[in-house]
Image (tube, rainbow, N blue to C red):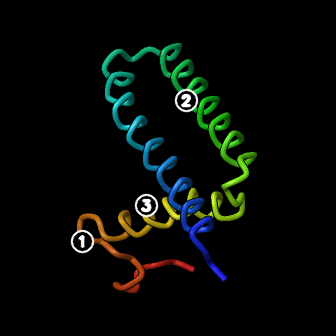
Amino acid sequence: TIGLQHATSFAVGAGLMGLNWWLLIQTWSRILGKKSIALAVSIIVIKWTLFGSICIYFARSNWVVPTWLVLGIASVLISVLIAALRSNGHNPITKGTVDL
């Protein structure tokens, strides 16, 4: 059964990805404004190193179920896909314009 520990692990994973996306949005405008490749690479490397370290920390914690942590992280990707399909009123799936 799914308990509080599973739900908390899922929430931590989704929260980490939400924070990751928020930081990306906050820093990307600065990166594009300065047009510095070194700055972009530095921020990307630092951000992903921190994100990986935090994920490893939580995965090793006694109160986090790693599978549910990963599902929480993946849930944000599903949300982004849904948002992308709904943006600008263009949804190739419902309009039948998807090339298979």
Q: Residue at x 53, y 53 (%)?
A: 12
Indicate which disc residue 89 carries: 1
Q: Residue at x 69, y 39 (%)?
A: 57
Disc count in the image? 3
Percent x, y of residue 89: 24, 71
The crowd level at tag 2 (other Cα within 10 Å; few <14, some 14-19, many 20+) is: some
Q: Secondary structure at mark 1?
A: helix
**Could you say which is closer to the camera, residue 99 or residue 69?**
69
The residue mark sitting in front, 1 or 3, is 3
Instruction: Classify 9 as above or below 19.
Output: below
Q: Amino acid at mark 2?
A: Lys
| Of the image marks 1 and 3, the number of the one nearer the N terminus | 3
| Of the image marks 1 and 2, the number of the one nearer the N terminus | 2
Q: Amino acid at mark 3?
A: Val
Mark 1 vs mark 3, CA separation in Å: 15 Å
| Of the image marks 2 and 3, the number of the one nearer the N terminus | 2
Instruction: Classify 50 as above or below 20.
Output: above
Q: Are marks 2 and 3 in contact (CB under 8 Å)?
A: no
Q: Residue at x 56, y 62 (%)?
A: 10
Instruction: Classify 35 as above or below 14.
Output: above
Q: Secondary structure at mark 3?
A: helix
Task: Kindly identify which residue carries mark 3.
Answer: 80
Task: Kindly identify which residue carries mark 2.
Answer: 47
